[in-house]
Each structure stands twice: as structure tokens, then as C-alpha cells.
Amino acid sequence: MLDLLMSAVNQQMNDIMRVLTIIATTFIPLSVIVGIYGMNFDTGASPWNMPELGWRYGYPAVLALLAVVGGAMLIYFRRKRWL
């Protein structure tokens, strides 16, 4: 009975760890994108700065990019039957 209980507890812990791993894996690329765009850029100082910072729809475009990346990762995890 003790082995059966330990097996059930381990299975539940594995399920929880899988969900937490998927959450972390989904938010890591989003954090990188937000970190890059969160830097202070001076578009007049260098030609190497991102041109979309001066674009009128740059902010909504980045939000759309974040939604697409996050959604694509969740779809991928769901197709692999990890979620």
C-alpha cells in the first residue's frame, strides 16, 4: 500500500512539474523580447537602433508579436499532448 501511495504522489508531482515547466518555457522567449524592447534606445544616435521604435504602430506590433509567440508555443505544446 505504501508503494501504491508513493507512486500516486510521484505521478501527481510529475504532472505539476510538467505544467510549471510549460509555463516557464512559454514565458522565457516573451521575457527576452520584452527585455530587448524595454531598453532605452536613441534612434537619432545610431543607425543600428530598431526602426520600429519610431513607427506609429510599433507598440501594438510588439504586443501582437508577443501574442503570436506565446500562442504558437501553447499550440505546439497542445499538439504534442503535453498540455
Image: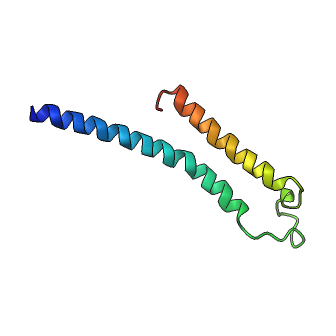
Q: Position of residue 17 (x, y in %)?
A: 37, 43
Is 3 situated left or right of 13 in this image?
A: left
Is 7 situated left or right of 25 in this image?
A: left
Number of numbered labels in the structure image: 0
The residue nearer to you, when weighing 77 against 2, is 2
Q: What residue sits 72% from the left and 67% below the top?
A: 39
Q: Position of residue 33 (x, y in %)?
A: 67, 54
Q: Position of residue 38 (x, y in %)?
A: 70, 64
Q: What residue sits 59% from the left and 38% below the top?
A: 73
Q: Residue furthest left?
A: 1
Is 52 situated left or right of 76 in this image?
A: right
Residue 19 falls in which quadrant of the image? Answer: top left
Q: What residue sits 69% from the left and 47% below the top?
A: 66
When the figure is inspected, residue 16 is found, relative to residue 35, above or below; the finding is above
Q: Position of residue 62 (x, y in %)?
A: 75, 51
Q: What residue sits 30% from the left and 37% below the top?
A: 12
